[in-house]
Image (cartoon, rainbow, N blue to C red):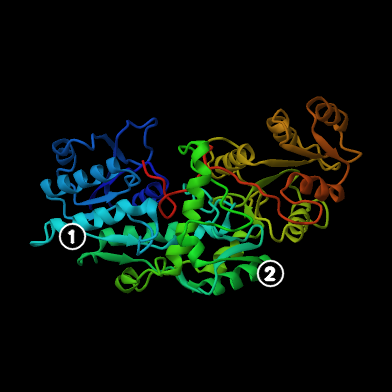
Amino acid sequence: MVKIAVAGGTGQVAQEIIDALVATKKHDITILSRNAPTTNSESGVKYRTVNYDDKAELAEALCGIHTVLSFTQLVSSSGNNSQKNLIDASIMAKVKRFAPSEWGSADIKDIPFWAGKEEIREYLREVNEDGQVLEYCLFQPGLFLNYLAFPYKTAKHVVPLNTMFDFENRRAIIVEGHDFFMTFTTVQDLAGIVAEAVDYNGQWPIAGGIRGNRVSVSQILKIGEKVRGGPCAIETVKLEDLEAGNLKTSWALATSHPSVPEDQAADLLKSVLIGTLLSGSKGAWDVSDEFNQILPDYRFTQIEEFLAKAWEVTKLPAASDEAPRGVKSVFLAGTTSKIDTSDWRETLSTSLSTSLSDVPVTIYNPYRTDWDSSWCEDIDFAPYREQVGWELDKQVKADIVVVYFHPATQAPISLLEFGICARVPGKAIVVCPEGYWKRGNVQIVCKKFGIEMVDNVAGLREAVLKRLPVDPRGKTQRHQKADDRGQSGYSLDAGIWHE
């Protein structure tokens, strides 16, 4: 077991890494924060409120800690002082390992909002100048691969952000005459590497490159065009314009962090895009591969596989704990009995998959082939309780619930499911053919609450498609789904806006 302290542990990337560490069930984890937590941790992670301006208090908080992972914000002088104090306190408390707030590119020149990182790198060199007093590693995964799937959320905590590669709208911005290499690593792979690095018995490398994918700009575009099924509109910018602070393009980044004042967002986003293009052309995002060599058996998510999965319809069967992906989720409620020659759920899922070939939508199908008719339908019978619990949970979370009343059944459970979603505006779509014994009741409820009702399964496809992010020409509409806190934003680190 390793005792780990996470500074700034409430940030997006920090939370992804904490989840990976918790999943190992090996470590004692404490989150250091300026503010007390608003909720209790269900994972056993402890919180400790600290004052980053008080070295003695920090040293006391770090007493007995083996490894410190820092995610403190570095966009101001106060942020730099906080991390310097954290470094000093780690030395005072005899912490063995320290990971400063890096989590991005190898080189930070031409990225003005990361200037604080160089100051911290130099400070760590200075404190170890006369002999190592603190083992440290600069974890550098490059740019998060998750961002290439914008606007679709592909991680639990890290929100989707757009980049120079806008595959949603099949367009990109590149630097004229510079087909430079970049490293793309999913935030999940970064978290996995950090979890293994904590257990690693050898010396941490100072430069901790994590090379999930190393590809040139032209290769990225080729993969994106293949996955999206068409060419990208390419806009080129001149290096000298970028160096002069000019961005001569028809579009720019569109998402900003909630903490950034609205009147400052445009300038910040312009700076981020210019910085990414300019630094990329000078090799900043072509990170090294130290952790690939240290952990040769680790299998990284590949770009084409990742993007192909991001732009597909996901069908999740009953009891699946896989997280939903995409801009919408659909739960298929109603009749489950195999009355007809074909299952209506499978017919609809296949039809939607064809229609939404480039729009990631998650479809929940509660039908299960392993259902045992001998199961006791009682709350004390675990398999039954878990199945019903799964269905209720997914119905509540789904954006759309389709309820089908087969005329050959009474479908009492379907009526119950209908009642659960009927009063949520825009949630339910009902299929109730002629002959269903309570069709009149269903019609009245639909009229009362403005619920769309179709007469047969054949009409269901169009009803569902109208609710999904596809325009009449089949193109994806811009739709961003925020994280659980209702926030989305651009980060000043490779996917992170620190505490």
Residue 497, percent from left and from top: 41, 45
Is 499 situated left or right of 339 in this image?
left
Circle 1: residue type? Arg
**What's the residue at 30%, 34% (across, down)?**
34
- Kind of residue at badge 2: Pro
**Which quadrant, please, contains the C terminus?**
top left
Q: Is residue 441 left or right of residue 224?
A: right
Residue 144 in sight here = no
Tell me which label, 2 or 1, sits earlier in the chain. Answer: 1
- Badge 2 marks a residue whose secondary structure is loop
Total label count?
2
Does residue 465 appear anywhere in the picture?
yes
Which residue matches tag 1? 125
Local secondary structure at mark 1: helix
Q: Is residue 209 above or below residue 24?
A: below
- Residue 231's label in the rendered image is 2
From the viewer's perspective, is residue 485 above or below residue 176? Answer: above
Residue under the point 30% across and 54% down? 117
Closer to the camera, 159 or 490? 490
Q: Residue 295, position in %: x, y?
A: 32, 70
| In the depicted structure, whether residue 486 falls above or below residue 125 | above
Query: Residue 288: x and y, percent?
Result: 35, 71
The quadrant in which residue 420 appears is: top right
